[in-house]
C-alpha cells in the first residue's frame, strides 16, 4: 500500500506561451542569484516556436560483472542543459552584448568577432500567471553563449540572432547550504529593474 496518494490534477502547472525572455549579462562571481550584475535585456521580437530549454540525454557507463549479466554499478553523468532561441532583432546593442560584436561609433559600424570569446548570461523564460501579477520563470542562471547571426532567405524571412548556449552550474543558497545547479524554477519571479 502507498504511503501517500496524490492526485496531481488540482495543482497542475501548465507553462505555455512565455510573456518575457530576459537575458542578463553575467559580470559577477559565481555566487548566488545576485551573480549576473550586468545589463538586462527584455527580448521583445522572439521568433515563434524557436525557444527551448532542453537537457541532453544522460551518459551511462556500466561497470560489468564477471559472473553476472547485470552490471555491478551504472555510473550516470547528467546531460547538459541547452538554450536555444531566435530573436528577430539585429540592433547593435544586442549584437554587442549577446554575440560578441564590437561597436565602432566613429565609423558607424558593428563588427563581427574573428575569434570566440566566452560570454555568459543569465536567461529567464517568464510566464505571467492567471492572477495577472505572479510570475513564474524557468531560469538558466549562467549560460555560456554560443550565439550567431543568421542572415538567410531574406526575401521571405528576416535576419535574426540565434541565441544559444550551454548552462553552467552556479551555487545557490538553499536552507543555509550551497547547492550547485544549472537550472531552477523561480515561482515568485520579478522582472529586473535598473539599479541606477
Image: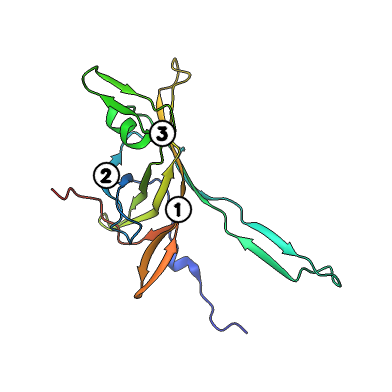
Q: Nearer the viewer, residue 85 or 143?
A: 143
Q: Residue at x 42, y 49 (%)?
A: 16
Q: Which comes sooner in the sequence, label 1 or label 3?
A: 3
Report the front residue among 10 and 140. 140
Instruction: Determine which residue is flagged by label 2.
Output: 40
Task: Point out residue 49 in the picture as x, y percentages from the top left corner.
Answer: 46, 38
Alpha-carbon distance for marks 1 and 3? Answer: 25 Å
Q: Are marks 1 and 2 in contact (CB under 8 Å)?
A: no
Give SS at disc 1: loop
- Secondary structure beneath label 2: strand
Residue 32: x, y in percent?
33, 62
Q: Name the residue at the top extreme.
A: 155
Image quarter for residue 46? Answer: top left
Using the image, determine if residue 87 lies above or below residue 70. Answer: above
The image shows residue 182, relative to residue 87, as above or below, that is below
Residue topped by disc 3:
47
Mark 2 crowd level (few <14, some 14–19, many ≥20, 10 Å Cα): many
Q: Which label lies toward us, 1 or 2?
A: 1
Question: Tag 1: Cα neighbours inside 10 Å, few (<14), some, or many (≥20)?
Answer: some
Q: Residue at x 31, y 28 (%)?
A: 102
Question: In 3D space, how far apart are the residues under numbered discs 1 and 2 (Cα atoms)?
Answer: 19 Å
Residue sitting at x 48%, y 66%: 9
Amino acid at each position: 500500500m502507498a504511503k501517500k496518494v496524490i492526485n496531481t490534477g488540482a495543482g497542475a502547472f501548465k507553462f505555455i506561451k512565455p510573456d518575457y525572455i530576459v537575458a542578463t549579462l553575467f559580470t559577477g562571481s559565481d555566487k548566488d542569484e545576485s551573480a549576473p550584475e550586468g545589463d538586462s535585456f527584455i527580448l521583445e521580437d522572439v521568433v515563434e516556436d524557436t525557444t527551448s530549454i532542453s537537457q541532453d540525454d544522460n551518459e551511462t557507463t556500466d561497470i560489468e560483472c564477471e559472473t553476472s549479466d547485470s552490471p555491478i554499478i551504472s555510473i550516470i553523468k547528467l546531460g547538459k542543459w541547452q538554450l536555444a532561441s531566435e530573436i528577430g532583432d539585429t540592433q547593435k546593442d544586442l549584437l554587442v552584448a549577446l554575440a560578441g560584436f564590437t561597436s565602432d561609433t566613429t565609423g558607424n559600424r558593428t563588427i563581427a568577432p574573428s575569434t570566440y570569446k566566452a560570454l555568459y548570461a543569465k536567461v529567464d523564460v517568464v510566464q505571467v500567471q492567471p492572477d495577472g501579477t505572479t510570475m513564474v520563470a524557468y531560469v538558466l542562471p549562467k549560460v555560456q553563449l554560443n550565439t550567431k547571426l543568421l542572415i538567410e532567405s531574406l526575401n521571405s524571412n528576416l535576419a535574426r540572432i540565434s541565441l544559444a548556449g550551454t548552462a553552467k552550474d552556479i551555487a545557490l543558497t538553499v536552507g543555509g547550504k550551497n547547492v550547485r545547479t544549472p537550472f531552477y524554477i523561480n515561482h515568485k519571479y520579478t522582472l529586473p529593474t535598473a539599479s541606477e
